[in-house]
Image: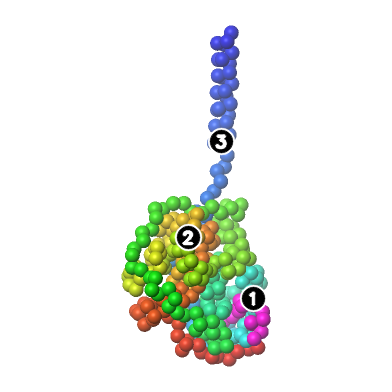
Amino acid sequence: MLSRFLKIWAVVLGLVFVVSCSDDNNTTPSIDESQVLAEYIEANGDYINTNAPAMIDASDVKTMLGVTGKVYVVDVRDAATFAKGHIPGAVNVTIPNLLVHMKTIDHTKYEKIVLACFSGQSASYATSLLRLLGYNNVFTLKWGMTSWHKDFDSWSGKIGNSKATQMVQTVTEKPAAGKLPTITTGFKTGKEILDARAALLFAENYTPASITADNLFADLGKYHIVNYWPNAQYLDPGHIPGAMNYIPKTDLKLSTALKTLPTDKTIVVYCYTGQTSSHVAAYLRLLGYDAKSLSFGANGMMYDMINGKTGFTTFKESYIMNYELEK
């Protein structure tokens, strides 16, 4: 009797197992949204690894002003600062409102849409997001409103050498590749995920995407530091201790070193000026990384080590054009 009872239970458990497995097989697996998004971006222009950074000089903007269809200038600074002076004809739209504004205009009517901020860094962040969304005629005003008029010079007081003596030439290797971050928008296609993620980043503004050199150096081990320069420059003149060299337009692809970036650590990207790294930080944050751009880049911490050195970009007061302001 016991033997028969055990046999019956064995059959019942077997049926439960079969049904359970069948249900599992019929369940639609959740998608890796970050992977889908990265694949979509790489298949649709791959802006960061091709054309970034998209910047334009003040002199070129000045030439286009007043010519119908040439340029549309959006000043992303706060309203009070905008009122003190701005590029003639510019409209004032802060970053949290920028995406909505872009959808209200026919951006194809203009040869170039130029975003102007204080130093070129927050505008670069917004430019990157818009470019990744397909607004391919958007550019950052290089050096920001500093380059337009001395009244808004936010660069001269920021260049310096406060960390120069701490730079090293020791190579720090990238970690082994892992997984992309986990993001959850609830969407399935790359375009839908991109739209949802971009809307979130515009809403949170640029502030969470930047870090000062002082805050970084207060605890270098806390961060995964990306030196976004060619390899030769990583070694000469040197780099932040512990920084790993990620070669521009090469190492931030799925097929190369993108997945060596950690998902459990804040990533700090630095370039020469903070403008290119702001472009990169926007892309990485879209994918779900906790990425930040180092404010003012190498200009703000090791200026004399790179000034005049081939291949480096450094700020000079001669870049301030003192063009007409509208108030």
The span picked out in magenta is: 71-84
Label 1 amino acid?
Val
- Side of 249 relative to 36 (left or right): left
- Residue where numbered disc 2 is placed: 222
Please give the name of the residue rendered at 64% of the width and 82% of the height, measured from the top-left corner: 81
Q: Residue at x 60, y 89 (%)?
A: 325
Query: SS class of the residue under badge 1?
Result: loop
Task: Between label 3 and label 1, give the one nearer the viewer.
Answer: 1
Apparent side of residue 234 relative to residue 51 in the rendered image (left or right): left
Residue 123 percent location from the top left of the image: 55, 74
Task: Determine whether label 1 and label 2 are within 8 Å by CB.
Answer: no
Label placed on residue 262: none
Chain-order first, disc 3 or disc 1: 3
* Quadrant (top left/top right/bottom left/bottom right) for the C terminus: bottom right
Residue at mark 3 to residue at mark 2: CA–CA distance: 41 Å
Residue 253 colored in magenta in the image: no
* Residue under the image location 56 percent in, 60 percent down: 194
Q: Which label sits on residue 93?
A: 1
Q: Quadrant of residue 64?
A: bottom right
Q: Choose mark 1 or mark 2, whichever is in front.
A: 2
From the top left corner, tell me how far across and down residue 313 is, in percent.
Answer: 41, 79
Secondary structure beneath label 3: helix
Choose the circle earlier in sequence order: 3 or 2: 3
Residue position marked by numbered label 3 in the rendering: 24
**In the image, what residue type sits under mark 3?**
Asp
Does 73 lie within the magenta span?
A: yes
Q: Quadrant of the N terminus?
A: top right
Which amino acid, mark 2? Lys
The CA span between labels 1 and 2 is: 35 Å
Q: Is residue 256 above or below residue 63?
A: above
The answer to which of 245 and 217 lies nearer the viewer is 217
In terms of secondary structure, where does tag 2 sit?
helix
